[in-house]
Image: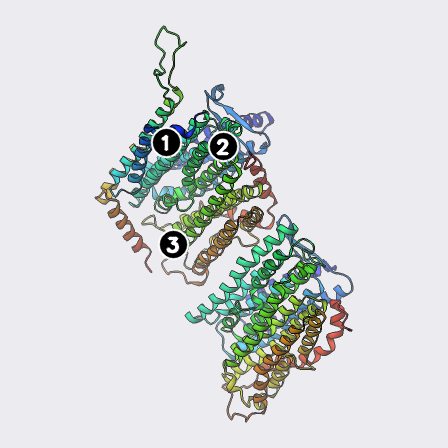
Amino acid sequence: MVSLQILAGLPYALIVAFALIGAGLAASAPNLLKRIVGVAMIWTALALFLVASGVLAGAEAPILPPGQGAFGKVFSNPLQQSFARAVLIAGAAGLILALAIVVRIREAYGSIEGDAIEAADRAQDDTENEA
Amino acid sequence: MNADLLLLIFLLAPIGHAMAIGAAARAPALRDGANIVIAFAYAWLAFVLVNWHQAGAQGYVALARPLPTADFAFAPEPIGLTAAATFAALGALNAPFAGGFFRAMQDKAPARAQVLIALSVGLGCAAALAANLFTFLLCYQAMIVASFPLVAHYGGPEIRRAGQIYFGILLTASVALLLPAMAWTHGLAGRLDFIAGGLLAGKIGPGEADVLLALFVFGFASAGLAPLHLWLPAAMRAPAPAAGLVHAVVVASVGALGLIKVSLLIFGEAMSQASIARPVLIVIALGGSILASLIALSKDELKPRLAYATIAQIALCSAGAMIATPVALFAASFQIVAHGLGKTSLYFTAGAVEALTGRTRASELTGLGKRMPWAFAAFALAALSVSCVPPLAGAWSLLWLVAGAARADMMWVVALILASCVASFATLGPLAGRAIFGPAPSHPFVRPDAASVLLILPVAIGGAACLGLLFLIDPLSRFLGVRLSP
Amino acid sequence: MSGALFDFVRANAPILVLLAPLVAMAGAALSPSGRGAWAIVLLGAAALTAAALAAAIGYDQRLSDPLGGWNAPLGVALRIDGLSAYALVLIGVFAMLGIGGGLGALRDEIDRERQPLAAAATSAALAGAVGLLVAGDLFVLFAFLQWMWIALGALTAMGAEHDRRAGPAALNVVIVGAIGTGLFGFGAALVFMSTGAADLDQVSGVLSAAEDTRSASAGLGLMAAGLAMAAGLAPLHAWAVGAFSRGPAWSAVALGALLPAAGAIAAGRLVALAASALAPGLQHGLSLGLSLLGAVGALAASAQAMAARDFRRFAVYAGAAQAGCVAIGFSAASAGGVSGALFQLANQTVSIFILYAAAAALRSESGAGAPMQVLQGLGKRAPFLSLAISAALLSLIGAPMTAGFLSRWSLLQATFEARIWWGAAGIILSSLASVIFAARAFERMYLRAPAPDAPRPRTTYLAPGLFIAAVMIIAFGFDGAAPLHAADAAAGSLNWGGGR
């Protein structure tokens, strides 16, 4: 079992910091595209985090060269790498959808600034809920 | 017919009552006639129920099982039955009065008010007959909901505000205090039944008992303990037949009855564990009673004055429940009957005066007794009775309450009770005197037909009953199972 | 159903509950007409319910389906235990009622050529919710979570033709979902790093033997937080406000009530797993924190519901307030508390479904908004619809003789027993707050005169669902033994706090 001590390692700290910056952007950036960039940063960091956690010192990529056995060799854990691939796919799906929606928002509102859009929505709410 | 069926009919009768009024809403004569007939039949049913109970046929009805450990069930016991019979009888007296009152005031929606009065009284009776705390609470809350539109009957922003105060205080207290108290009780005892000897006897320690008792006492805000008494003055915006019977008598009495039941059937012997809370609550009840009388003196509007007098007088019930000796509990139960009868008569007079002369202030009553002799004779009798002046009915509650306190070695309580009765007398006694002996006004009546018999007869009967209750004390004490000889 | 078929369905329930909405999704996407797609999706929900019921009948026995015969750690497994069987039945039934009732809204609000896609997206979101409940593996759970968010985002965006406000709402769903899923992913990575296992059963096994479980518990906590977004627990419910009050009414009525329920149960399972691995002191802290979070969330959401001017938004806030109470129940960390929470969750689903269905019946021609004025004088205009709304509101308050009373009562008992005074206060205060916001709705429905030009409520398809849900509230209020027993049984399969 690997304990939290590895978190002390610099790569992890950097990855987590990267993810936090992404989360801040995604949650509060006024520009919709910047929010999407933030999301992409979180997910990239997540993939990196997974891959990093499977790396062993001095290990090779878990690819079996043709004609050779695996005996006596040290591989990085392939499980994390396959997870990371899943993360990238799922993340890409979300990003594509988000970008498509932003295009439609731009068509409908003429803006991709969150504040302006929110103000327009509020105004529409207010006219509906009058009296 | 067996007792269970009778009980079920009694419980469901108010629904039929309300539907009958609603069906005849557009035909005033038919509507009032049906209201009066059904109200009397309902009262008669209540007395049959009492008689059967005395003969040993007790009855039990379970309608649903909303909690795994508590049915929605009804099982009459003497104190609750006495209260229910009182409410039903007063409801019968109120029916003709309400008919006369709404006609005289040319009310816009008399049918709605009569429906709600019938439902509130019915729910009050149902609460009185509840077999367990859950059922009591449910009927109590339903009664609050049913009586709330009566407060807002006349409409308008100020009156809506009064309705919010009424509803807000009573319902908030019942949800925020009674519900946790009930959950706590369930946690301690595993069920919620009313049990002779006390559900919690032997299951609760000193500190817990103090807190739990306080939760119950303030949770039943309709018993009018300060500082949760403001709902009653707010309720005075209701038309007189509702303000009098429903709010000042049924709602307030059901709160007091809740305290009596909690003291006798939930705590029982465990009341002795609440050795800190009891004296404190007695002081709050009786001190509040004296203060309420003083406030009543400062009110010139008749209905608010009566409301504060009610707060003062219903507090005797709460005090009796906290003293918790058998005699004190009997006194508290008897006070529900005596106070209900007296206070209804007082509101009848106030309503009759308002309907016939348009006067709503205490100072305007001077000499009116010479023009409305029957009404004010009854008013005087009722005023003396609720102020516990011998030999009227109310005096007996005072007497037994004092005896109960003395037997519990609480002599300071005796002093407080007497002071409270003196203050209570000061609010209503002189008023009755001025009304009867003052100089008569020349042209008091705003309506040519003067006193309608519908308005005056219930007043007179109520006043007479305050006197007549004297003769009921022996059978009543036997029914309630208390030996009154010292 | 004959015996052999029943056994087959039961044995394969974990994969069938997932296949039903997925196949329906594919069928709906290929269907030429909106109505045909709707029928296919409805059929998928029915199949899901049937398989869930078959699994629930044997909930004493845990159903496990290692896909392709590969066992963990190499393969992934789908599992149904008592908890997920309970949740699946709940979700299946309300998917049927909601999808069945939503046809009118689907046809009114979504472009004709997109109707099949909208139906397919709905089925996809439903499959995601089911996946959250049957996935036995951290990373499969992760994939279903993201899947669900994407499907919901796409569905919400399809409302933008009818009301452009659905666009930003959809983007918000996708972004919030991605943040939540990212959080979940980091948690899952942490758990995997510290236990070496991705299968939940193995994780639990490793944790019960391990000495230092703090990092794994932190990971489980992160995962639960990611799922709590799906549960709509305030203050993480902003996405639901957009999706269900500005998106199409169809999505609210078909999914609005059940997605939060699935999220809450999946989150509850992880919190329970984390708690069982913690030392008693930390367990107590977790329970305190969760109850505080629940109480604050319940009160904040109730306050928002009081101020809400839009009926659908009102429903979202009311649901978020209930989710707070559910969190309090989980925090009691006892069988009683979890059972109360599950029962409360079911009641919440029923009541919120009624509110969304009523909002769909009262939808306007012009846009997605359903201002509170639509309730004006409804008591006269549509007495039965008003009665259903009243039943839902009373149950949300926890009024006696409705199902809501019993669940609040169970929660109150559990918090008293566990001495979580915060939680008890939160439940009581949120109940009081619900009285206030419900009173406002009652006043509009029964005391105000209807507007002269108020449109007739369109309840053609919604009536059966509304009727069934309202009857459930009242019937279980009169005798709550059946749902209480089901919740107890489901809670029994959750091992909370028994680990150490």
Read off the residue under disc 2. C47
Quadrant housing residue B274: bottom right
| Quadrant of the image containing the C terminus of chain C | top right
List x then y, in percent, for residue B79: 69, 66
Label 3: few (<14), some or many (≥20) within 10 Å? some
| The one of B207 and C467 positioned closer to us in this rendering | B207
From this view, report whether residue C377 is shown above or below residue B248.
above
What chain letter is assigned to the residue under label 1? C
Residue C308: mark in rendering: 3
| Of the two numbered discs 1 and 3 in the rendering, the one whose residue sits closer to the viewer | 3
Read off the residue under disc 1. C29
Please report contact status of discs 1 and 2: CB closer than 8 Å, yes or no: no
Disc 1 to disc 2, C-alpha distance: 18 Å
List x then y, in percent, for residue B247: 56, 70
Quadrant housing residue C120: top left
Label 2: few (<14), some or many (≥20) within 10 Å? many
Circle 3: element type = loop
Amino acid type at circle 3 is: Ala
Upstream in sequence: badge 3 or badge 2: 2
What chain letter is assigned to the residue under label 2? C
Q: Does residue B252 appear left or right of residue C99 in this picture?
A: right
From this view, report whether residue A4 is shown above or below residue B234.
above
Circle 2: element type = helix
Upstream in sequence: badge 1 or badge 3: 1
Amino acid type at circle 1 is: Ala
Circle 1: element type = helix
